């Protein structure tokens, strides 16, 4: 039997839970030390013992768990999962009806009513991401519920919590038919090769769909493009599909090169006409400056934190410097796509980094467009923090 306990929340947190705040932070609890078993159902009550909300204990870097319902009598059963999943699927009808895009998020954690779990759709297959041991205790009910509400070719999963090295079991395969990888998905008509059975990442970050499309449709034609921290080169492929004269992709990871070649190839684009470099971005900036190379469009999409042999990069500390490096090798009237997925600061602060970089470089700019998470990555209004993505299209004027 699943454990169920009642915990008292602080006065400050009480008002937040009453407004619909979904995250159970450690600081919100008077008696957090009573939580011992991941997956425990937690009834939150005020100091007078009045029921506020019901959730579960699942430790993530964000907090101690998530609220699931504010209805005292609602059981966290398979039926609950089915209702929650169905509601999420209804919200994505337009995505399912669009043949040009066959990969998108169908369930976005707390944005869809169950923090700690995301589900992505990839051309008939469903991929579940579990973000805590606690949420993983609901695995059987959630997978059974999913099986009842969708027509899946196959179901895969990723455990995104510390499993002491046991991340992958049985190739991440859960149910249905096994896929053949790479699986080719479409995004606004562009092909992407994805792997659901190969480590934590699949080959494409679905949250950048609208940004890739903007590059393809509005900014790439006739342009030279530099894609830094390029991973599988998804932005480069979008730019090439949009008519870029040439793309240059730079990533430190050795396998990024073969992965990028693959993404170009599944679109019939000759990768030999593109530059694909396995190197440290910071070394590339030096090289480009020395060679006086400049680009019309520069994409900057670093990880929140990275450490290479020579450099440690933390977005919150180093974005301004990174931006300065980019400004130095962008053509006048060129564009920098400045992106970050760091949840540790908001859009305002991010714009501050850009402002500072241009000031220090003595150059002027104009923000042409800004993007946050796309519609399928649902965020709830009571928890705007859930929208971690910030992308600015910055023109050098
Ligand atoms: N922009 C990519 C996602 C980037 S993920 C996309 O849209 O798909 C972050 C990538 O940064 C990883 O592939 C990692 O290998 C790379 N990386 C981290 N530090 C780096 C560095 N110093 N130089 C080059 N690449 C780096």
Image (cartoon, helix red, strand yellow):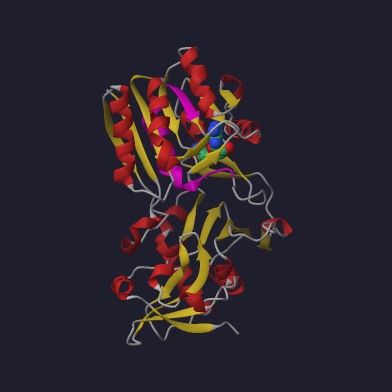
Q: Position of residue 25 (x, y in %)?
A: 42, 67
Residue 244 is left or right of residue 345, and the answer is right
Question: What span is in magenta?
Answer: 203-227
**What residue is rendered at 41% in x and 55% in y?**
94
Q: Quadrant of residue 142?
A: bottom right
Q: Position of residue 154 (x, y in %)?
A: 64, 59
Ligand 1's quadrant is top right
Q: Which quadrant of the figure contains the C terminus?
A: top left
**What residue is rendered at 49% in x and 29% in y?**
227
Q: Is residue 226 visible?
A: yes
Q: Is residue 222 visible?
A: no
Q: Examine the structure image and report whether residue 206 is included in the region drawn in magenta.
A: yes
Q: Position of residue 198 (x, y in %)?
A: 67, 48
**What residue is rendered at 68% in x and 46% in y?**
181
Q: Residue furthest top?
A: 291
Q: Residue furthest right?
A: 170
């Amino acid at each position: 039997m699943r454990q169920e306990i009642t915990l008292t929340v602080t006065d400050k947190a009480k008002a937040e839970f009453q407004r619909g705040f979904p995250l159970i932070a450690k600081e919100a609890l008077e008696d957090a030390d009573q939580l011992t078993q991941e997956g425990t159902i937690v009834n939150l009550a005020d100091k007078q013992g009045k029921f506020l909300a019901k959730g579960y204990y699942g430790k993530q870097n964000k907090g101690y768990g998530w609220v699931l319902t504010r209805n005292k009598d609602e059981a966290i059963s398979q039926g609950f999962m089915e209702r929650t999943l169905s509601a999420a699927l209804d919200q994505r009808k337009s995505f399912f009806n669009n043949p040009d895009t066959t990969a998108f998020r169908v369930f976005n954690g707390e944005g869809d009513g169950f923090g700690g779990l995301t589900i992505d759709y990839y051309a008939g297959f469903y991929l579940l991401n579990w973000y805590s041991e606690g949420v993983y205790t609901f695995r059987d009910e959630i997978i059974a519920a999913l099986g009842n509400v969708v027509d899946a070719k196959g179901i895969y999963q990723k455990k995104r919590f510390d499993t002491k090295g046991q991340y992958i079991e049985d190739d991440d395969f859960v149910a249905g038919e096994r896929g053949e990888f790479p699986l080719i998905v479409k995004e606004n008509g562009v092909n992407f090769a994805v792997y659901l059975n190969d480590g934590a990442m699949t080959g494409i970050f679905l949250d950048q769909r609208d940004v890739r499309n903007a590059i393809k449709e509005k900014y790439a034609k006739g342009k030279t493009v530099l894609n830094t921290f390029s991973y599988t080169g998804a932005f480069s492929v979008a730019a090439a599909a949009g008519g870029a004269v040439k793309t240059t992709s730079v990533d430190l990871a050795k396998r990024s090169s073969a992965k990028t070649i693959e993404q170009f190839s599944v679109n019939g684009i000759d990768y030999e006409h593109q530059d694909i470099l396995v190197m440290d971005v910071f070394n590339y900036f030096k090289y480009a400056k020395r060679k006086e190379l400049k680009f019309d469009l520069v994409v900057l999409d670093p990880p929140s934190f990275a450490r290479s042999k020579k450099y440690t990069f933390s977005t919150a500390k180093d974005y301004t410097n990174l931006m300065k490096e980019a400004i130095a090798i962008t053509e006048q009237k060129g564009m920098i796509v400045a992106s970050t997925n760091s949840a540790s600061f908001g859009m305002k602060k991010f714009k501050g980094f850009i402002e500072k970089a241009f000031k220090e470089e003595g150059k002027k700019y104009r923000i042409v467009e800004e993007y946050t998470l796309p519609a399928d990555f649902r965020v709830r209004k009571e928890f705007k923090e859930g929208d971690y993505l910030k992308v600015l299209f910055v023109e050098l004027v």
